[in-house]
Amino acid sequence: MDKFRSFLAMGGYAVYVWPAFLVAALVMAGQVATTLRALRRREAALAELEARGPRRAPK
Amino acid sequence: MHRFANPGRFLRLTAKLLPWTVAASILLLAVGLVWGLVFAPPDYQQGESVRIIYVHVPAAWMALFVYTIVAAASASALIWRHPLGDLVARAASPLGCGFTFIALVSGSLWGKPMWGAWWVWDARLTSMLILFFLYLGHMALLGAFDDAERGNKAAAILAIVGFINVPIIKFSVDWWNTLHQGESIFRLGGPTIDPSILIPLMIMALGFTFFFVSLLILRVRSEFLAAKLRGAAAALGR
């Protein structure tokens, strides 16, 4: 337990080390989320278009 | 739509690669994080604050690497009209912007305890901030026109001209007297960082690279679909 607490304390630099990792994690998670959301939205829009109109687009 | 006939092969090939790049990214980031945060030693001068290196340096490398890709893709689109060029530039730019942001923020969080300041206008930091604005400008231009082709062209010119900033960032620590430390890894005579820090750092850098490649694959596919949708909308006269 003490070992874990000292790990969290980061030798007194906790307020600098953890936010640095947190910001990286948040930005990268956000990138994954926005990428997947846009991809799904566009796939759905295209599927709808192809189901509706005459087939003009290849594939 | 004929212009996008080509990317089909690229999309098929990268779809096969995707599970491997995702797995490599997760594995490398997990190993790198545990190694860097737990097993790597603290620095004899900087103490535990040195662990910020495991996000700061990979993010900064990616910021430059991704910009290079955006500029190269823009050049291939503008000069050779390669159909993938615009798609790759569109797909990569927001990712590079994110990495630049991580590098700036983590650098600031490292600068405060080590230099006593969140920010200084030294050549490395200033040129990195300019890179951030170049990314923002690139993304703004991409969305600034009703005609996506015009947006692609304007953004491509900015990306190519802005590439001059990449070597400036790289060599800023040699050309100017910066508070930021000099190159300690890719230098003549070998790295000056001890392997106990260098190895987990390289693992993290590889993890970031595979993370970027995975998202790039998905985003190029996404931009391909978006272009297709724009084409369909134009054909329907909307």
Image (spheres, coloured by chain):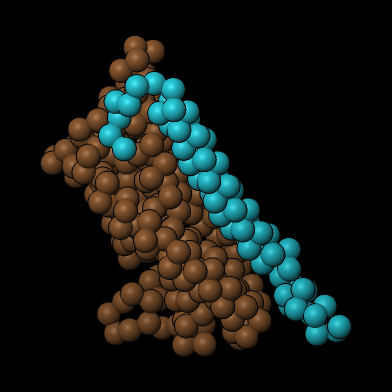
Q: Quadrant of the N terminus of chain B?
A: top left
Q: Could you say where residue B186 lies in the image, as x and y percent from the top left?
A: 33, 75
Q: Colour of chain A?
A: cyan
Q: Image point 39% across, 53% down: which residue?
A: B217
Chain identifier, brown in the render? B
User: In this image, A31 relative to B210: left or right?
Assistant: right
Q: Is residue B197 above or below residue B85?
A: below
Image coordinates of residue B22 in percent, x first then y, are 48, 64
Residue B1 visible in the snapshot = yes
Q: Residue at x 45, y 53 (%)?
A: B215
Quadrant of residue B31 in the image?
A: bottom right
Q: Position of residue B196 (x, y in %)?
A: 52, 87
Would you say B72 lies left or right of B127 here? left
Q: Which residue occupies the foreground of this view, B94 or B224? A: B224
* x then y, percent, for residue B172: 35, 59
Which quadrant is home to the C terminus of chain B?
top left
Q: Residue at x 82, y 78 (%)?
A: A5
Position of A52 compared to B188: left or right? right
A43 lies above or below A17: above
